[in-house]
Image: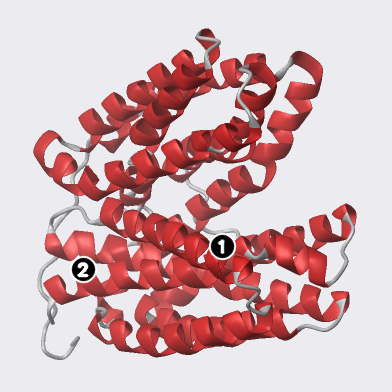
Amino acid sequence: MNVGRARWAVTAVFFVNGCLISSYLSRIPSLKAEHQLTESQLGIVLTLFGAAALVSMQFVGGLVARVGSRRLIRIALAVLPFLLVGVGQARSVVQLGLAVLLMGLVHGAVDVAMNAHAVAVERLRGRPIMSGCHAAWSISAVLTSLSSAVATRADVELGSQFVVVAAVLLLVGQVVTRGLLPPAADQTDRVTRSGWTVGWTRPVLIFGAMGFVVMVGEAAVISWSGVLLHESRGADLATAGLAFTAFTAFQTVGRLIGDRLTERYGAAALFRTCALVAVIGLTVVVAVPLWPVSIAGFALVGLGGSVLLPLVFSAVGRTGGVEAATAVSRLTTFTYAGVLIGPAIVGWFAAAAGLVWTFTGLLPLLVGVAANSRLLSARPRVRQPLTSAER
């Protein structure tokens, strides 16, 4: 068993999954135009994806414990490309909704499985890798959005683009997953009961609340930072988009170096420091009414927040009482909930109190997350190498 090879294999899985999902997300405007969807119809389609992912996440943890995350990842990365093609070839709203629903179900499963596999690699390797895995997802999202923009500008048909992307990623996915760990790597000495009622332990709930806050903040920046710059800071529409660009770029940089920083300073110290950097960045955004300063503030938010979620995923995989995959699936439920309802929460509060005050309200939540950094102090435990029979 080659743990070093598995480290790069699971990182590649994050990249491939990011390319597949981002290919769909980046062409949502094209899907809306092609199917002549109203805002409410598009909202239903988007909700189907997120809701389906949340449902499948509840049952993946026990499945990983029984059959291993490698098998689930390989199956999911074989199915997802065909579902992406189905989204591109849909000829009615019903067909589109069904394809998106199935895509959400499979994505929810692979999201849990690949994070659980990364936790297993960390445990065996004795060194952090989660931040690098999430960096691979971020990079794939940026590259895919750029390639989709080029395809849209060149009037490439949506269905044709998805066929090409699916064919390439189907091949790449099956090649890179050969380096993943065997099923025995997912087995621990913890409870192996399955079912959606298992795994809601106190540590998991605490880490879930932390992940929820982090993702609400991230979703708020992604959805509303440009609106804040345009309506409250006087930036034109083209400039307003730079807030998201700065956030994403610095988030990616932070994740690329996050694992090395974790090894050097420890998870708890890095988490606390980065959370405070995000707090400082958000304070700059709401306190200084100048759009260039706000862009710099959002860059700090991206840099500080870059490692928070990867560190929480690593920490929840080390909690006692349940299988790592089950704990990861419960955490993913919280994070997805933050992504889904975060923009809506910000919109509701912005309508009542204004966008600047709404972003200000996120500050005490981030401070509370930083205050719980001590919970991440436990380091990954190195498991004994697998026996020849387990291999």
Residue 232 location, x and y as percent?
Answer: 66, 17
Of the residues shown, which amino acid type is indicated by label 2? Arg
Q: Nearer the viewer, residue 25 or 152?
A: 152
Of the residues shown, which amino acid type is indicated by label 1? Ala
Identify which residue is drawn at 78% across, 76% down. Answer: 96
Mark linked to residue 7: 2
Residue 195 location, x and y as percent?
Answer: 57, 67
Residue 55 location, x and y as percent?
Answer: 66, 64
Identify which residue is drawn at 38% across, 66% down. Answer: 14
Within 10 angstroms of label 2, few (less than 14), some, or many (20 or more) residues?
A: many
Residue 241 location, x and y as percent?
Answer: 56, 38
Residue denoted by label 1: 149
Within 10 angstroms of label 1, few (less than 14), some, or many (20 or more) residues?
A: some
Position of 36 compared to 209: left or right? right
Kindly state the secondary structure of the residue where label 2 is placed.
helix
Location of residue 296 (image quadrant):
top left
In the rendered picture of this protein, how many numbered marks are placed on residues? 2
Q: Can residue 378 be seen from the camera position used here?
A: yes
| Mark before the other along the chain sequence, 2 or 1 | 2
In the image, which is nearer the foreground, mark 2 or mark 1? 1
Identify which residue is drawn at 67% across, 77% down. Answer: 158
Kindly state the secondary structure of the residue where label 1 is placed.
helix
- CA–CA distance in space, label 2 to label 1: 31 Å
Q: Is residue 249 above or below residue 27?
A: above
Location of residue 391 (image quadrant):
bottom left
